[in-house]
Image (spheres, grey):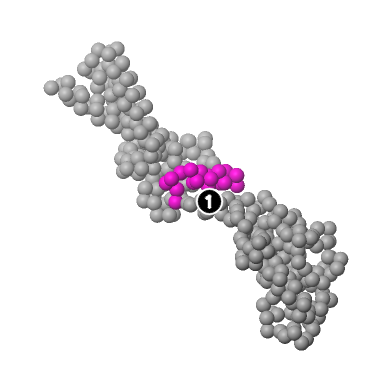
């Protein structure tokens, strides 16, 4: 009868040690910032584990105290029933294999789920060892202050997002990944990288006469907005919108370009970062911004150019296809 009692006692003690060992590796492997984000998103497991993980040293001390107590009790129980060296060998094998290696390997498979499942048991351990674990926590907090959470760099975020392409369980599709990667790289690119060079830009001087032939020429270009510059390309008078010309009769009348409504355009430097360009487009209230370098206009950038850089694909409309054909 005594042998069965010993087996039950040892099984319970080794199981307790296994849970403590698994919780030690599982709880401490969880990142507090990640748990906080998941808790804000409504993850119940994260909400249950977060308070325990935030009190790192209290939780750690409670787990280790309980684990050491279970290991010591296991050795005492075996020593009462078995010879010294047999008890020592048996205790070592049981604790190392069943109480350390296997539970740690198991709990690391899904640390959040295991930590959440045993959270009530962990709270009991904290209460049971509070008299000792609380002073230990105070000492550890003083010796090893909590470090601020480290944010991922832009390149690290890019790698994290790229991993979603190879993981079938990801909620992100390929287009979403490309858009996020493109957005992350905006601050590293400059407007000169996406602008249309002035040599390939259709623009008009302010003294242009708008007659029937000129309107046909403008229509053939297929642009909705025409920038107006001086001949020296040092000044932008504004942007002409094609929609403003729809109701004007150019068959029997000729107009000067400066008679038309021109919308102001804010120039930007060629080294302006692309993330700054978003704010420029918003503040300027326009879809086209001239680009200058050394006080001379060298090209134009449009909101379409910026969107193409983000999505990683060229956005073509009907006139683009027609010009290409």
Which residue lies most toward the left here? 1
Q: Which quarter of the picture shows residue 227? A: bottom right
- Was residue 107 drawn as part of the magenta stretch in this picture? no
Q: Which quarter of the picture shows residue 262? A: bottom right
Report whether 275 appears left or right of 61: right
- Was residue 165 drawn as part of the magenta stretch in this picture? yes
Report whether 98 appears left or right of 228: left
Q: Nearer the viewer, residue 98 or 168?
A: 168
Q: Main secondary structure of the magenta part?
A: helix
Residue visible at 49% across and 46% down in the picture: 164
Task: Report whether residue 256 is seen.
Answer: yes
Which residue lies most toward the bottom here? 252
Q: Nearer the viewer, residue 112 or 286?
A: 286
**Up/down of 249 relative to 169, above or below:** below
Q: Position of residue 296 (x, y in %)?
A: 83, 61
Q: Position of residue 247 (x, y in %)?
A: 68, 84
Could you tell me which quadrant the N terminus lies in? top left
**Up/down of 17 relative to 80, above or below:** below
Residue visible at 52% across and 36% down in the picture: 144
Q: Position of residue 214 (x, y in %)?
A: 77, 76
Residue visible at 36% across and 43% down in the picture: 113
Residue marked by disc 1: 177
Task: Report whether residue 279 is seen.
Answer: no
Q: Over which residues does the magenta segment extend? A: 153-171
Q: Which quarter of the picture shows residue 299? A: bottom right
Q: Nearer the viewer, residue 246 or 68?
A: 246
Residue visible at 31% across and 26% down in the picture: 98
Characterize the local packing of mark 1: few (<14), some (14-19) or many (20 or more) Cα atoms within 10 angstroms. some
Report whether 247 appears left or right of 120: right
């Amino acid at each position: 009868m005594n042998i069965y009692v010993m087996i039950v006692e040892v099984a319970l003690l080794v199981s307790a040690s296994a849970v403590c060992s698994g919780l030690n590796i599982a709880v401490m492997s969880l990142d507090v910032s990640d748990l906080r984000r998941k808790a804000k998103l409504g993850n119940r497991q994260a909400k249950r584990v977060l308070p325990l993980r935030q009190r790192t040293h209290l939780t750690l001390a409670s787990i280790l105290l309980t684990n050491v107590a279970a290991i010591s009790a296991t050795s005492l129980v075996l020593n009462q029933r078995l010879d010294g060296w047999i008890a020592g060998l048996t205790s070592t094998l049981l604790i190392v294999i069943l109480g350390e290696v296997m539970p740690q390997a198991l709990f690391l498979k899904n640390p959040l789920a295991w930590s959440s499942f045993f959270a009530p048991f962990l709270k009991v351990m904290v209460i049971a060892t509070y008299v000792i674990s609380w002073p230990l926590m105070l000492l550890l907090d003083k010796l090893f202050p909590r470090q601020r959470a480290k944010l991922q760099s832009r390149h690290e975020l890019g790698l994290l997002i790229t991993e979603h392409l190879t993981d079938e369980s990801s909620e992100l599709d390929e287009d979403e990944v490309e858009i996020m990667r493109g957005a992350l790289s905006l601050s590293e690119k400059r407007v000169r990288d996406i602008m249309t060079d002035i040599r390939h830009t259709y623009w008009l001087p302010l003294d242009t006469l708008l007659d029937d032939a000129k309107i046909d020429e403008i229509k053939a270009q297929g642009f909705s907005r025409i920038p107006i510059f001086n001949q020296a390309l040092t000044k932008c008078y504004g942007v002409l919108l094609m929609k403003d010309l729809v109701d004007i009769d150019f068959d029997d009348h000729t107009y000067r370009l400066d008679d038309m409504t021109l919308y102001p355009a804010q120039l930007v430097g060629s080294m302006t970062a692309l993330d700054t360009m978003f704010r420029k487009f918003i503040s300027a209230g326009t879809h086209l911004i001239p680009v200058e370098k050394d006080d001379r206009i060298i090209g134009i950038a449009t909101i379409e150019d910026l969107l193409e850089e983000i999505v990683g694909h060229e956005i073509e409309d009907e006139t683009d296809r027609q010009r290409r054909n």
